[in-house]
Amino acid sequence: MNQQPEAASILIVDDDQIMAELLGIWLEDAGYVVVRAVDAPTALSMFGGGGPFTAVVCDFDLGRTTGCSLVAELAELQPGLALVMISGHPEHRVRAECLTDGVQFLQKPFDPAELVRLIDGGSVPRD
């Protein structure tokens, strides 16, 4: 009996609830399973308990902190994890503060298809 591959689980980390919901809808429509977190501590607890995730989409601004340390910690916890940082700030500012090799960047506003292309480019399986 052939088993279909499970849908990829994507963790969305954004303190803007509306943006997190919108990102989730776009990714669910593309065939992904989505889990949302509003801050870094929640994301870390979900990552540890609900993982492994195949990709993380993280906002640069997470209220009192940035997504930089979270992305770095998640990359350490799961090498090879597809990471996408999103922000309304220009790419050069975000890259200067925290982006390293292997972390993709999307500047808001962006086309939902662009986000899906970045995740797909990281060889993330979908159903």
Image (tube, rainbow, N blue to C red):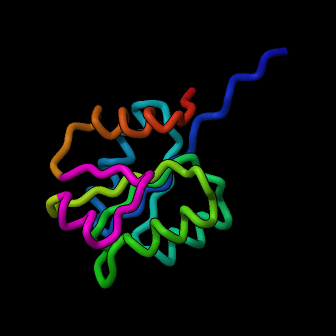
- Residue placed furthest toward the top: 1
Identify the residue shown where x is 42% and y is 31%: 30
For residue 19, what is the image quadrant?
Answer: bottom left
Q: Give the range drawn in magenta.
A: 91-107
> Can you say whether 71 is above or below 6 in the image?
below
- In what quadrant of the picture does the N terminus appear? top right
Figure disc tally: 0
> Can you say whether 45 is above or below 54 in the image?
below
> Can you say whether 12 is above or below 39 in the image?
above
- Residue placed furthest toward the right: 1
For residue 48, what is the image quadrant?
Answer: bottom right
In this orientation, which residue lies closer to the viewer: 87 or 41? 87
> Is 45 left, or right, of 72 in this rendering?
right
> Is 89 left, or right, of 116 in this rendering?
left
> Can you say whether 28 is above or below 43 in the image?
above
- Residue placed furthest toward the bottom: 64
Identify the residue shown where x is 66% and y is 33%: 6
x, y percent for residue 24:
39, 47
> Is 13 left, or right, of 87 in this rendering?
right
- In what quadrant of the picture does the C terminus appear? top right
x, y percent for residue 60:
29, 67
Q: Is residue 102 magenta?
A: yes
For residue 51, what is the image quadrant?
Answer: bottom right
In this orientation, which residue lies closer to the viewer: 120 or 62? 120
Identify the residue shown where x is 57% and y is 39%: 8
Q: Does the magenta stretch include residue 94?
A: yes
x, y percent for residue 77:
63, 65
